[in-house]
Image (tube, rainbow, N blue to C red):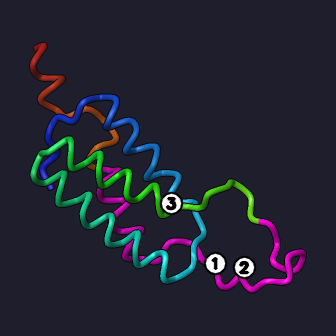
């Protein structure tokens, strides 16, 4: 993936969202949806389309929890607390690849002033 010059605000927002995602715990089926969202984000980045990047980020963010802390299922008498897990290897690979590619401004931005 060749990084194109994303608007700074979008790049910062994307990196922030992806770093939060690295620490999230979701159900295995939810991680499958996240992997699909990351594939769409990767495709949007490869196309160099900021609108598609923003849409992919919005879709990924919508897959996350709706509150910071979960209420333990024992207090609710439900089974909603089932098998939450850290990101699987496939998701971590997507996250690490995108974060690494975009964590610093593109080299062309530095060489333009030289």
The C terminus sits in image quarter: top left
Q: Nearer the viewer, mark 1 or mark 2?
A: 2
| Residue lying at the far right of the rendered structure | 75
Rendered position, 108 above or below 34: above
Q: Secondary structure at mark 1?
A: loop
Is residue 14 shown in magenta?
Answer: no
Q: Nearer the viewer, mark 3 or mark 2?
A: 2
Rendered position, 5 above or below 22: above
Query: At 87% across and 80% down in the image, what residue appears?
Result: 74
Q: Secondary structure at mark 2?
A: loop
Query: At 74% across and 86% down in the image, what residue appears?
Result: 79
Rendered position, 76 above or below 100: below
Q: Position of residue 35 (x, y in %)?
A: 36, 72
C-alpha gap between disc 1 and disc 3: 14 Å
Q: Nearer the viewer, residue 62 or 39?
A: 62
* Circle 1 residues within 10 Å: few <14, some 14–19, many ≥20: some
Q: Position of residue 92 (x, y in %)?
A: 42, 68
Q: Secondary structure at mark 3?
A: helix
First in sequence: mark 3 vs mark 2: 3
Query: At 20% across and 41% down in the image, what residue appears?
Result: 50
The N terminus sits in image quarter: bottom left
Q: Which residue is mark 1?
A: 84
Query: At 37% across and 60% down in the image, what residue appears?
Result: 95
Say whether residue 46 is left or right of residue 28.
left
First in sequence: mark 1 vs mark 3: 3
Is residue 77 shown in magenta?
Answer: yes
Q: Which residue is mark 2?
A: 81
Q: Which residue is mark 3?
A: 22
Highlighted range, magenta: 71-100
Q: Nearer the viewer, mark 1 or mark 3?
A: 1
Asked whether the residues under the numbered discs 1 and 2 touch, taking CB atoms below 8 Å apart as contact, a structural biologist would say yes
């Amino acid at each position: 993936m060749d990084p194109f010059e994303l608007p700074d605000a979008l790049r910062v927002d994307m990196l922030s969202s992806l770093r939060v995602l690295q620490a999230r715990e979701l159900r295995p089926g939810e991680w499958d949806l996240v992997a699909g969202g990351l594939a769409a984000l990767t495709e949007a980045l490869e196309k160099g389309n900021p609108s598609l990047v923003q849409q992919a980020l919005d879709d990924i963010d919508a897959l996350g929890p709706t509150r910071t802390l979960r209420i333990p299922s024992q207090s609710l008498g439900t089974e909603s607390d089932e098998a939450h897990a850290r990101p699987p290897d496939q998701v971590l690979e997507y996250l690490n690849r995108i974060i690494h590619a975009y964590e610093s401004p593109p080299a062309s931005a530095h060489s333009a002033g030289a």
